[in-house]
Image (spheres, grey):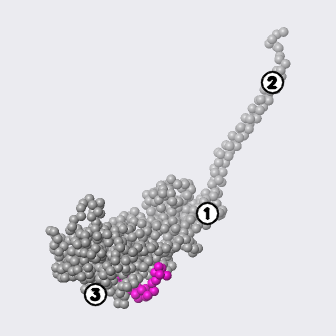
Amino acid sequence: MRSDVYESPDRPGRRYFARRLAVFALAITAVFLVLVARLYYLQVVRGPSFRMLSEENRVSVARVRAPRGKIFDRYGNVLVTNRPSFSVNLIMESVKDMAGTVSMLSEVLGVEEAVVMERVHRARPYRSFEPVRIMEDASRRQVAVLEASKYEWPGVQIGVEPRRYYPFGTLAAHLLGHVGQVSQAELEAGDGYRAGDSIGKEGVEKVLDGQLKGVEGSLQMEVDSLGREIRVLAMKEPRPGNDVKLTIDLALQQVVEDTLRDKMGAVVVLDPGTGEILAAAGSPSLDPNRFVRGLSRNEWAAVQRDGSHPLQNRIVRGQYPPGSVFKIVTAVAALEKGVIDEKTSFNCSGSLRFGKRRYRCWKRGGHGKVDLHRALVESCDVYFYQVGIKVGIDNIAYYAHELGLGRPPGLGLGGESAGIVPSRKWKKEARGEPWYPGETLSAAIGQGYNLVTPLQMAVLAAVLANNGTVYPPVLVRSVTDPDGRKVEERPLPEGRAVDISPRTLGRVRDALYGVVNEPRGTGRRAAVKGVDVSGKTGTAQVVRLPRGDERAKLEEVPLRYRDHAWFICYAPRDMGRVAMAIVVEHGGHGGSASAPLAREILLHLKNLGFFQTLAGRRGE
């Protein structure tokens, strides 16, 4: 039998299996071709239409900003509140033409393109679907233009939200502070802020920002591809921030501000029995509403160049030589150390030669023979030169610290200056030099290295009004939630008795009453009929004029070289209800520039019945 015609018994089975395999392969190929065709149809043929359908409706989650808490004065008068405003935002993921959108926003909003791009870039590290703040408080005209062109420029969003508002403008601006847009550094600090948020930048707004800022809400909306709202899906209501009540009196604050108008300087008014600040102002200042709106680069540059320094909080950061007000400290030190008593007298001929230098008195012909009382009343420099030599700089420094100088007062506004109270140790550490005897003469009358702030000087006046008790200054009374429930009641701090005998304080207080009420008193322009005012004037030398020019008339001296004018006071004499410090920069003599301002404030308080009705919380 031939092998090539031999047929295996299983050959028909193999042919059957091959046919089934071919059919299966054809089926798989057909299914694959159907899937490919379907994918081609969905992605290529119908792709654009499906893409449009997918983008036509989607869920947008918007932040609902919480209103900041309000700030009130001691009687419940509103000092800071909120008002509705329009904001212009950009949703980054929705923008199709960034360059064109930025150009359009620049033109409509009147903002440089570089500024718009800077705000865009600032937000790039954050989520692209979150709105980026381009402008706050847009005008109705700007909003109308943007709304009319919103279909042409997708991604531009108009928001309505609360905006910080200071109804009295510059009033108490340095105490209240202001808010501004959160900075990159503040964002990186991780305190829960996001790009575009407002945050307290200065004053109470900054210190109590955590209480004032509230908790934001959210709004889930179904929107189309152009951002048009279709329906609200869910909403979480924002929680407004807590309200803050301060110690200041709005009416008195307005009077204080009026006295400083057109002047550079500061006024601080305290309740000496509690340490509460009743009014405090620095001049000049800026309207906090300008910071809420946002200063342009040119505006900011102009503020920085302003020689009157309106941004400086003179109340707690302005440092000035105290001038003759410091004679109070020198007198206390000398009495406590027993180097003089109330009968000790020195002759003032108009100057004192010490070493190779002649130290002059402000009175050209001198005061003649003077004791402590007259030396304080008439502010004799020569008397205190000699007292300074006897008591020494370190003793003067000790009692200056006891009276609250040379240390931050502790108001809690941040950035409070400590001033300078010089001593041998201080000069060695600060200057690397020994103390020279002649420097004690200048320090004894408040010149030389001595520096104080207006708030420190008001505390000094309050210590004398209290006959020797120091109360730290207080600005915040309480914090309440939006429903009026007290979150925090701030107790008044305990007072500290100074290490000064009542006898010494009594002698000094008698002299301060004479400063205002005796015929030759340098502060007699502060006298108010029916109110027993005690005080002390001070004239702080800014620069030492060349010999022969020291006695030039005020108007003949360039403004920047004129002396600072001080006046501190308290009233009434036996039970101080108000203590005050006033400094007028380059104002000349304290008795002629600052004492009259104190009289205006005290007279207003008298006419309001202030001295009869004011009751401090400590006695309530």
Mark 1 and mark 2: Cα distance apart in space: 70 Å
Residue with the most extreme front position = 338
* Highlighted range, magenta: 596-620
Label pair 2/3, CB-CB below 8 angstroms: no
The residue under the point 72% across, 40% down is 34
Query: How far across and how far down the image is residue 572, in percent?
Result: 38, 85
Relative vertical location of residue 297 with respect to residue 377 in this rendering, above or below = above
Percent position of residue 400, x then y: 32, 71
Residue 15 badge: 2
Task: Give SS at disc 1.
Answer: strand
Q: Nearer the viewer, mark 1 or mark 2?
A: 1
Give the residue drawn at x 57%, y 74%: 485
Q: Which residue is mark 3?
A: 518
In the structure shown, which secondary structural element does the residue marked by tag 2 occupy?
Answer: helix
Question: In the rendered structure, does residue 231 fall within the stretch colored magenta?
Answer: no
Q: Position of residue 23 (x, y in %)?
A: 78, 31
Left or right, 226 with respect to 74, comes to: right
Count of marks placed on residues: 3
**Amino acid at pointer 1:** Leu
Quadrant of the image occupied by residue 249? bottom left
- Residue type at tag 3: Glu
Residue that label 1 marks: 219
As rendered, which of 505 and 146 lies closer to the eye?
505
Mark in front: 3 vs 1: 3
Which circle's residue, 3 or 1, is located before the other in the chain? 1
Using the rendered image of the protein, determine whether residue 426 is visible from the camera's viewpoint.
yes
Residue type, label 2: Arg
Label placed on residue 356? none
